[in-house]
Amino acid sequence: MRRVWAILVAGVFLYFLVGQFLPIIPTFGNVDLFTRVAFDIINKSTTTNYNAVEFKKSKDLEDGSANVVTSIVVNYRSFDTLGEVSVLFCAAIGVGILASMLKSKKRIEFEEHKVLMISTGIVLPLILLFGAYIFIHGHLSPGGGFPGGTTIALGILLLMLSNNEFKVTDVAKHVEQSAGAGYVVIGLMGMAIGGVFLINFLPTGVVGNLFSAGVVPIVYTFIGFKVGAELSNVISDLREG
Amino acid sequence: MTDFFKSLIEMLRDPVSAMSVLVGGLMIVFALFAVEAKKIVDSLIALSAISLLSVLLFVVLKAPDVAITEAAVGSGLATAVMLFALWRVDSKADSDSQQIKKTNKQSDEAGEKR
Amino acid sequence: MSNIIYYVSFIILGIGIYGIVSQKNLFKQLISLSIIDTAVNIFIVALGYVEWGEAPIYSAITPVANFVDPLPQALVLTAIVIGVGTLALGSILLVHINEKYGSLDPDEIRDIREVVE
């Protein structure tokens, strides 16, 4: 009887989606970008006049990063990213508190394997280096702070799997709190210098260089450290009980 | 009849349509398996496979940022977190069908009698 | 018929809703919630696709702008990370529920609570 109700509910929902919603939106691919907000964001002209942006030639624009999605996430909608970072923070606090309240204090034990231990010694520095590369070059190539931090946390998970006595110490907690506070401090510095919270107050150089785009690489470095330490804490709390 | 097949092949020349038919069909099969599996570990592995297949769709839709984030987060971290939580759940609540639950209860009562 | 990717994401959404309503184990309901998250992310990114557009990054290959819409991609980036946060918190809550009531079946939990009260 439950399955009949489930099929009925899913069927009604799908009827309204496919029958009433799909005819209204434009067909797949036939989008005129001139009528959308993204046109101003791609040409970096939300407050200035329209001027075509070229790679390695345009200088001192209002944004300056070659990756347009990064410029949206860290520069134009930076407050939403602050909200996302705080949502992740609340989830990590919840996991930490609830995991220490369990009555059965079991610790998940892993079997040690010789091949895994030796190959982790070779691969782990490369994983951490790759994670740092992803969040340092967030404004030039795809990636950014969130996948960079997650890669670092997955490297720590590999270390946990290969070595049974490894514990994530208090260093991760201190890194997480100072990186999170650093993001807000940059926002307040923007308020002191430019008058608006989280404004880009450093000079934006040529589009495509490593040292360009103002505050964006610094913010992504802070987010990378914070997410990496946070997810390592979540995994360690779930393991130790 | 041949017109229908001709329009079908013409539609499949476009990379997004071809990829969405192949990968989308595989995702639908895995989603049905994840909902109807008997043990929960099987559902978890199907969920990880769905996340990994959606990365292919994101690459074809020209969204590399989203693809890298979903690959790192969806198939690496979410599966690890849920596996650790599943390990902590009692073994009696671990599977879904009535037969496996009955054999668990019988083996428990047999252990208590001794 | 070229918006077949919309149909694919709607079907996976329907399977996820079917999973939440019909399954009797709370862990399975959490997994179905994550399936719904993935399907909605695919749909939002597909809304911003422009035919013959390139990935929205200025590089040596695309020095001038001819891009797909980058705004839905920025929103989906946030949505993916929040989905994994929800999953982590939900699974640790399920561990607590199982420790207190002894099972992960919502009907059994309702019976135990009525007997206790």
Image: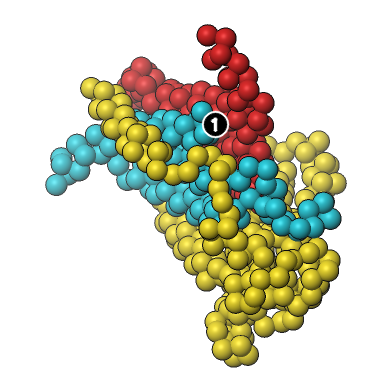
Chain colours: A yellow, B red, C cyan
Please give the chain letter of the residue carrying mark 1.
C
Residue in the foreground of this view, choosing between A187 and B10: B10
- The amino acid type found where label 1 is placed reads Ser
Q: Is residue C6 left or right of residue A110?
A: left
Residue A234 in sight = no
Q: Is residue A176 above or below residue B2?
A: below
Q: Residue at x 54, y 53 (%)?
A: C72
Q: Is residue B103 above or below residue A240?
A: above
Q: Residue at x 20, y 43 (%)?
A: C113
Q: Residue furthest top?
A: B1
Residue A5 at x, y = what percent?
A: 25, 27
**Mark 1 falls on what kind of element?**
loop
Q: Is residue C88 left or right of residue C116?
A: right
Q: Is residue B59 left or right of residue B39?
A: right
Residue in the foreground of this view, choosing between B75 and C11: C11
Residue in the foreground of this view, choosing between A122 and A204: A204
Q: Quadrant of residue C101?
A: top left
Residue C25 at x, y = what percent?
A: 35, 33
Identify the residue position indicated by label 1 in the image.
C2
Q: Is residue A125 left or right of residue B3?
A: right
Q: Residue at x 50, y 39 (%)?
A: A27
Q: Is residue C112 above or below residue A172?
A: above
Number of labelled discs?
A: 1
Residue A218 at x, y = what percent?
A: 70, 73
Q: Quadrant of residue C114?
A: top left
User: Dot 1: few (<14), some (14–19), or many (≥20) neighbours within 10 Å?
Assistant: some
Residue B69 at x, y = what percent?
A: 63, 50
Residue A19 in sight = yes
